[in-house]
Amino acid sequence: MSLAPTNADLAVGKTPGAPDSGAGGRRGIQINLRQSGIYIAFALIVVLFTILTNGDLLAPQNIHNIIVQNSYILVLAIGMILVIIAGHIDLSVGSIVAASGAFAAVLMVDNNVPWPLAVLITLVFGAAIGAWQGYWVAYFGIPAFIVTLAGMLLFRAVTLMILGNRGIGPFPEGVRTLSNGFTDGYLGNIALGPLGGADLVSVLVGLASVAGIVVVQWRARRGRQSYGQAVDPLPMFVAKIAVAAAVVMFVIVQLARYHNLPWVLVLLAALVLGYTVLSNKSVFGRQIYAVGGNLQAATLSGVKVKSVIFWIFVNMGVLSALAGIIFAGRLNQANPTAGNAFELDAIAAAFIGGAAVQGGVGKVVGAITGGLIMGVINNGMSLVGAQSEQVMLVKGAVLLAAVAFDVWTKRRAGASR
Amino acid sequence: MTDTILRMRGITKTFPGVRALSDVNLEVLRGEIHAICGENGAGKSTLMKVLSGVYPHGDYEGEITFDGEPCQFAGIRDSEHRGIVIIHQELALAPNLSIAENIFLGNEMAKRGLIDWNRTNAAAADLLRRVGLAENPVTHVLDLGVGKQQLVEIAKALSKEVSLLILDEPTAALNDEDSAHLLDLLRGLRDEGITCVIISHKLNEVLAIADRVTILRDGKTITTLPSEGLTENKIISGMVGRDLDHRFPPHEPTIGEEILRIEDWTVHSPTQHGRLLVRNANLNLRRGEIVGLAGLMGAGRTELAMSIFGRAYGTGISGRIFKDGKEIKLRSVREAIDHGIAYATEDRKRYGLNLIEDIKRNVSAAALGKLARRGWVDDNEEYKVASEYRASMNIKAPSVASVVGKLSGGNQQKVVLSKWIFTDPDVLILDEPTRGIDVGAKYEIYTIINRLADEGKAVLVISSELPELLGLCDRIYTLSAGRITGEVPRAEATQEGLMTLMTAGQEAPR
């Protein structure tokens, strides 16, 4: 049932200093399968719905819809994965989305504060809410489940106090552009043969992104090699880059054929990139994993555990406020029921994306993929005319299956002694 | 009437990639205490799991005969029905339930679905008398010390009409007094006709209590011997397959000036108001010196060490710390590390390591700042550092990307030590540095400790094993009920002398 603990000692009898062969043999392939299972599942789901919808799923406008409709959940999922890695949970994000949307509306619509300033103040508002919750969790020692359950009620109440029973709108042009609008096509269109016309700026941005991926990955590979670390064999490396480049170019060309790049995609890309680097390479990011993996060991290693947890919640508050602005801007109205059950989607995205319930495990890219899996299921099922209860049924099943798969692979890998 | 109660023949158990047991034979006589000895990973626990049905029939090869009948257990319940009860190293009691509830857990005395509490508590009281535990059966288990909890486990086993009792490292967490009581109890049970199989690392105990000893090495039975005429060294040579003339590497200390001095150190309990854990302790460490701290369980050794280490434990801490002659204040673990103090915990799994992460991230955990520029970690540098420690500390793992939770105890301990050495400390406090690791790895750890001292660091070793302190340390402090009761140079130290100091003043008022 499980591997003996000494297996690692016996598996490869290596001389010290020789390069590691993490990717060698059957064992390596199994590990890769476990880590990349979520991406394979995503690809299969996309293929499935592409077939079921006769290709409508990947039509230019529909790709745009999937991104814009899920943008605020994805923003929340980024914050949520960090909270979950640290071993906590946040049930209040839906209410914070509503409260910050209402707060922003009062600033912009009722008081005519210029929109960039109002956005900034709203983000600070979100940070303050996060600090409130972070204080109770980190310094007072109340479980996050309770604190944020209370927060779910408190901030919904704040929303209702701000809005009463009405909605506030419309939002200024700038905010609507951020959530719903497109970058400008400065350079006009370019003809792409049988694909028709596409926005040239978007295509160039796509090419630049691909070039960026290639350069960064190549330099990372060279860096690892110079330290004698194991890297993928060259054909594998090229294949991975080629797949990534193909996906990026496909999405961007489709978007360029429909219209220009949505601003919210640009924002999301920046957030994903920023938070991936933060979680992998910053001292703070490493400390999040350390705290979630073993709180006591982190404390005794000199990590300021309370401060780490506090700032995780502040960050979650800021991202919730950002999601609140995007959502309100998209509806063009701040609404008392906004953000209802968003916390569940964000939490589901994180767990589908490979986070562990006990904490210490998870990736930003995983959470985004988890969010997109649910987005594609939503979108694809509505395209084939499924009822909302059917969509719910499938999403619930996918969440359970994803976590069950994770538990199963872990047990097979013999983490237990 | 010396007939065989248990016969295990040709037991072979394989895990994917590893053969944990190969063709193991074990014969236990009715009414004897039979000890099983072997290094960690020799297969002792696996063998007992096969016997008790944790690994069901069909999961292993070979045959088991118990009481003259062949056995094919499908699970623990089957083996318990036949009177085989196993008490694991980590106690399996529910802390929030009473003693009586724990004893009859899963075996409740019920009438038509309702528990008869009077009968339950009366029966529990009888069992507690049998094991010599003077506690009320309705006391919650969390209010008992580890030694008493162990007795509750045995009472629970007795409630099941046990005829073969298996104990896995029963005294590992007990102090000497509780251990002695437990061993007496086992002798009493033997006289009542209960057969015991005991797994233990403490060879003096094995010799004191066992009638016969079976030695396992690398998943194979080496031999079974009567304990009469057996010595610790003979058992050890059977366990490791070589004579260990030197259990401790030779070391010539070069002791320099004082580096750390603790004055008038007092620590209060964080849970029990007004209770003193450490009282007015004074001690000092010098460069190049290995200093021992001896004390019985509950004497306040760990509490003393952790309170010095940035107040990581205890409240109401008072006293002064001098480093290189200058007074310093250590208000947090971070400050302690920054002042060149390192503390490697006695419980590496709970407090020392992030078991789900790999070697390199554990090695870097306490000094990530050294690998970072402006808050960004250089993971290539991290890999390099971890690889260097893997080589210099002889950490046996396929790569520094191996997950720490899958390493053996000795290799995990080397990761813990690497982590603290990487913080570049002047003073290392090592709390039970060889607990639960096998003889060969112990020797390596001792060598590392000597090397650290030779580099001019001061090492404070806390250990429950007096021979270890005598073999390793240049000077030994004894701690008893929170007080430093003695300071003995190596040349004058004996086990008896230390034990006297360790038990001095135990009756001091709380």
Image (cartoon, coloured by chain):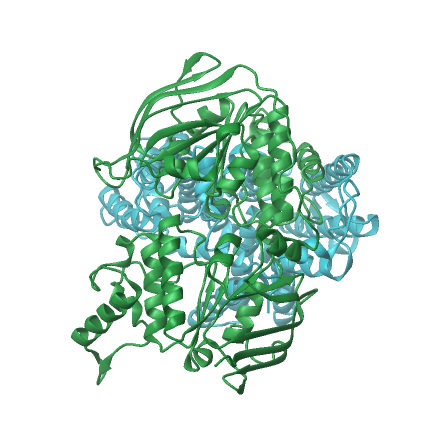
Chain colours: A cyan, B green
Residue B400 screen position, x and y as percent: 67, 43
Could you tell me which residue is drawn at 76 percent across and 42 percent down? A16
Confirm whether residue A308 shows in the render.
no
- Residue A164 is situated, as x and y percent measured from the top left of the image, at 22, 46
Q: What residue lies at 48% left-to-right and 81% top-to-bottom?
A: B1
- In the picture, measured across the screen, residue A104 lies left or right of residue A39, that is left
Using the image, determine if residue B154 lies above or below residue A82. below
> Residue lying farthest front?
B229
Q: Is residue B279 left or right of residue B427?
A: left
Residue in view at x 57 percent, y 44 percent? A265
Q: x%, y% of residue A145?
A: 34, 51
Outermost residue toward the top in this view: B326
Is residue B280 depicted above or below A320 in this figure? above
Residue extending farthest right: A235
Comparing A71 with A18, the one in front is A18
Please state if A294 lies on the left or on the right of B382 as rendered: left
Pick the front one: B176 or A388? B176
Q: Is residue B342 above or below residue B32?
A: above
For the residue pair B296 and A367, the one nearer the viewer reads as: B296
Residue B152 in the image: state x and y as whole percent.
Answer: 32, 63
